[in-house]
Image (cartoon, rainbow, N blue to C red):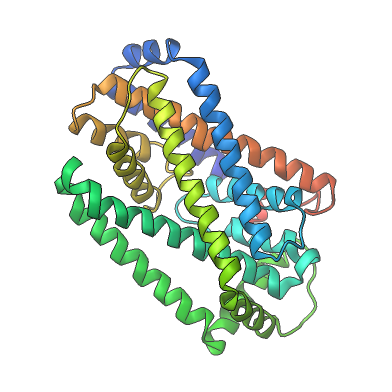
Amino acid sequence: MKKRLLLFIAGIMLVLLVVSFFGFEEVIGALVHANPLYIAAALGLQFVGLLLLGLRQKVLGGGKASLRKSFRVAMSGNFVNLIMPGPAVGGETLKAYMLRSTYGRGKAIAVIAVDDFIEILGTLLVVFFAVVFFAPMVAPGLKTVFAAFILIVILIMTGILKVLLTPKWLKRVVHWVIKRISKYQHINEKDYASMFYRAFRVLLKKKIILSKALALTLSIKIIEFAVLYLSFASLGVSLPLREIVVLWSIIVVFLFIPWLPGSLGLVEFGAASTLVSLGLASTTAASGMLINRAISLWFVLFVGAVAIYHARTKGELAKNTGLGDVK
């Protein structure tokens, strides 16, 4: 836990360094004069997007878990993933643990696996859309970067699906997950791999449920576009849709790069630099990204922390379980 705290402090220091690079006093001045109504609207939309994450998980589980519980599970997992440096699976382990009493451990892992798969699929569809329709007009040089990103993620997804649909390999993966869940609670020896395999294949055959989940995912992406737009609108800048979609895609690429918790510093600098290259004033670019990150990162962390607190009070997460136990 101390290591994560130090990494967070390092990330905050890096963000401050990025702000100073773009002009500390100018950026702070722009933030002070930002329109609070637009920021409030962005916060409201962000919360709606978080609710849809919980709803998607509920839909994939067949509606057995309540929306409140699904929301707590989704936000708790998000919190853990955000405080871990680089791409992490600790939050997915936590989600499966919190859902084990509702679905059983095998199906709980399957629901989280399909939930992640749908999220990545939705992200890929949007990035592909950006590459084909917007990147050539907005930033031709980024087309190759996006294409490489799509190819890499597709290869990773193909490999993951191969593992999940191959019983021999799947058994090792499920054993690894169960081993980490056992940090929260003792688990009796059972063939969880077979349970997961059956539940996962059943879920993949439910086309209506998968379609609903994908529709929710795309709706969440639209909300994220709106949050980006409002972040800059609060500074008096109206970014066109094509630039919003390309900027969102760039942020996604940066978030996939192993880095400090929440990709602190990397996203702020990379996205702001891209906007400057597109002709936006450096002060506005940096200020807009700071506002957006306050909403898409720090606000989400706050909601996740509250969700974990409520999960502990309701017995969904043991009170003596430290976040340092999540690997």
Q: Quadrant of the C terminus?
A: bottom right
Residue 51 placement: quadrant: top right
Residue 9 left/right relative to 148 = right
**Can residue 16 be seen at all in this image of the molecule?**
no
Residue lying at the far bottom of the rendered structure? 168
Residue 48 left/right relative to 314 = left
Q: Quadrant of the N terminus?
A: top right
Q: Is residue 304 above or below residue 173?
A: above
Q: Is residue 32 above or below residue 204?
A: above
Residue in view at x 26 percent, y 55 percent: 146
Residue 102 placement: quadrant: bottom right
**Can residue 122 be seen at all in this image of the molecule?**
yes
Q: What number of labels is visible? A: 0
- Who is closer to the viewer here, 174 or 108? 108
Residue 253 left/right relative to 205 = left
Residue in view at x 44 percent, y 58 percent: 122
Residue lying at the far front of the rendered structure? 208
Residue in view at x 58 percent, y 78 percent: 205
**Residue 6 image point, x, y percent:** 52, 38
**Residue 57 image point, x, y percent:** 64, 58
Q: Is residue 308 above or below residue 105?
A: above
Residue 310 left/right relative to 160 = right
Residue in view at x 48 percent, y 21 percent: 38
Residue lying at the far right of the rendered structure? 314
- Who is closer to the viewer here, 265 or 282? 282
**Residue 282 image point, x, y percent:** 25, 23
**Residue 77 image point, x, y percent:** 62, 52
- Who is closer to the viewer here, 212 or 131? 212
